Amino acid sequence: MKAFIITIGDEILLGQILDTNSRFMSAALAGIGVETVKMVSVSDKKDEIKKALEEGFASSDLILVSGGLGPTKDDITKGVLAEFFNSPLVFNEEVYGWVKEYFRGKISAMNEYNKSQAYLPSACIPIKNEKGTASAMWFERGGKVLVSMPGVPFELENLISSAILPRIKNTFKCSELAYKMLGVYDKPEAELAMFLSSFEESLPKGLSLAYLPSPGYIRLRLTAKGEGLALLDEYFEKLKQSLGGLKYSVIKSGDNAELLEKLSQIGTLSAAESCTGGNISAMITARAGASAYYLGGITAYSNEVKINVLCVKRGDLEKHGAVSKEVALQMAEGVRRLTGADWGLATTGIAGPAGGSAEKPVGTVWIAVSGRAGSKAEKFCFSSVRERNIGKASVTALQMLVDFSEENRP
């Protein structure tokens, strides 16, 4: 079972937006045993779209297309699909009802652009878009399937999860595939691969191990298919045993999902961020329900904010510098006191690319946590890359807070 993914939009090719849709679609397909053989991005031009469609049908059983389904004249995907399938655009009363339902209470009257969303190629099966006005379209030809979806990520993701994947599984006989993941901390990828070389050599047919670097940790994905499915649980336990004393956590879903879930269970918290510049707050609040436990954060980039808002002692800043154990601890304690949270978390460091010294090179970060049972600070030396340092410091800080809370659990 092979799939071909097409994303449409000049904004992708111009680098104005990141193509997260291809990543989401390929991951979703992998979860049901469908292999993505190619992903392409094309411009909003008829010939380019048609060429990609022809390539997809020539090489794959399933073609997923995203983008170009809006109501404006620059969105031409429906017209190209109508021509490709020799299927004229026709007005669909059911789809029009969906569009009116979506707009109910939002606009005073439907205009022609809104109404145009109800014109679809006659050969397609419309699939309701619960999050927007552009319906998904399911086409079948010669035993192959093409699904066209809107390019707005949250609309596409909802469609894939709630409607498209179930329909794919009912249409095709997909080879079952399963995987389990671990996140391993404080170990570079190459060293971890050497550490696990014997384990990899012991893997039987149907099992494979992949290394997926992320800021702050390495994800290990143990994948099983065919005869390896029955051995997945056994070898996942062997993988954990093979890690010895290395720090790891089981990952059940997306990036950092389990870590953020644990945060929600330790009480209220707040963050004081210097080198991470609000990234920790962004990670926490990106998760629905964060307001139940996250009270707020202070981005204390300057020394004056550290002093005037977080009550860091000026003398300690002058004596030890902003990137120091003393300052990190006072930041964590200060934000906890300021917000009344159960836990305070703080980061202060040199993200780079400039600002380092022989004593404190770029990548030096102090992370501190503070709770009712006490406070703790730890120094880390990450990399020379700014973005990587911010990401690693953020994930490491959250993991450090979870570990400290578990160590001091009543």
Image (cartoon, helix red, strand yellow):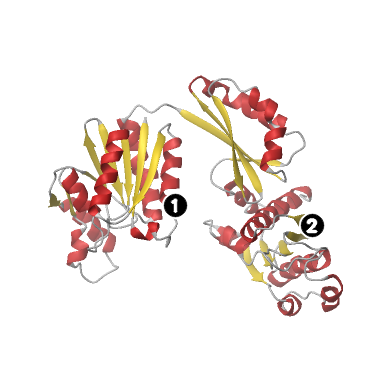
- Counting the numbered discs, the total is 2
N-terminal label among 1 and 2: 1
| Amino acid on which the number 1 mark rests in the picture | Thr
Q: Kindly identify the residue that appears in the image at 15 percent across and 53 percent down.
A: 93
How dense is the environment of label 1, judged by Cα within 10 Å: few (below 14), some, or many (20 and up)? few
User: Within the image, what quadrant is residue 59 found in?
Assistant: top left
State the image coordinates of residue 223 (x, y, percent, origin top left).
54, 31
The image quarter containing residue 30 is: top left
Residue 306 x, y percent position in the rendering: 74, 75
Determine the secondary structure under disc 2.
strand
Mark 1–mark 2 Cα distance, whole angstroms, equals 34 Å
- Give the label on residue 379, or none: 2
Instruction: Report the front residue among 356 and 350.
Output: 356
Q: Secondary structure at mark 1?
A: helix
| Residue type at tag 2 | Lys
Find residue 143 and report its image quarter: top left
Q: In front: 327, or 76?
A: 76
Q: Which residue is mark 1?
A: 20
